[in-house]
Amino acid sequence: MNPLSINPLFLLAGVAAAVTIGFGGGWTANGWRLNADIATLKAERANEVAVQNKEVLDDFVATAKKIKEQADGANADFSVLGTELAIIRKEFKNAKATPLPVDCRPDDGRMRSLTRSVDAVRKAVARQQPGGAVPDSGGS
């Protein structure tokens, strides 16, 4: 068979098929390469997000520990305050309601007791108010 006797239409179809197969193969190979690059970028971003989430979680745990410590301290202070208020209630319950003379001056022991009572009541009121503000008593 003479090579010059090949029909140019078949030759053109063969070249077109070869070009199409080459183009399709190149397109597929390039797609695989780009998919690998995208997968690498996604993995890197996932690692960055994981590191950021760990930092946030560590910060959250540290803050939660601080809050728990503060809450435990507040509970301890409140239990001491409750004991002081119970003593004050007992003292007032047992106090005699006799009027004092006009020129009466309380002695040092009674002044300490009154001061302690006022401080305990102020602490109790401060715990019950939002923001812990002690209300102004007007004259003291």
Image: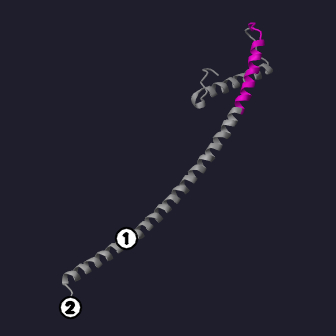
Secondary structure beneath label 1? helix
Q: Nearer the viewer, residue 12 or 19?
A: 12
Give the residue drawn at x 47%, y 61%.
42
Lateral position of residue 9 relative to residue 55, left or right: left
Q: In the image, what residue type sits under mark 2?
A: Leu
Q: Where is residue 58 in the image (x, y as percent from the top left)?
A: 60, 50
Question: According to the image, what is the colour scheme of the structure?
Answer: one colour
Residue lying furthest front in this view?
1
Residue 71 falls in image quadrant: top right
**Image vertical order of residue 45 relative to residue 91, above or below:** below
Dividing the picture into quarters, in which one does residue 31 lie?
Answer: bottom left
Give the label on residue 28, or none. 1
**Crowdedness near tag 2: few (<14), some (14–19) or many (≥20) residues, C-alpha within 10 Å:** few
Disc 2: which residue: 4
Q: In which quarter of the image is the C terminus?
A: top right
Q: What element carries label 2?
A: helix
Q: Position of residue 79 (x, y in %)?
A: 72, 29
Q: Do the residues labelled 1 and 2 touch (CB within 8 Å)?
A: no
Specify which label sits upstream in the sequence, 1 or 2: 2
Q: Is residue 59 left or right of residue 33?
A: right
Give the number of the mark in front: 1 or 2.
2
Estimate the spatial distance between the alpha carbons at disc 1 and disc 2, rounded to whole Å: 35 Å
Q: Is residue 77 left or right of residue 136?
A: right
| Residue at x 42%, y 66% (from the top left corner) | 35
Per the rendered image, the range of residues in magenta is 76-100
Query: Compared with residue 121, is residue 23 higher up or lower down, i.e. above or below?
Result: below
Q: Position of residue 45 (x, y in %)?
A: 48, 60
Quadrant of residue 32 in the image? bottom left
Q: Residue drawn at (19%, 89%), measured in percent from left and top?
A: 5
Q: Does the magenta stretch include residue 132?
A: no
- Amino acid type, label 1: Thr
Mark 1: give few (<14), some (14-19) or many (20+) Cα within 10 Å.
Answer: few
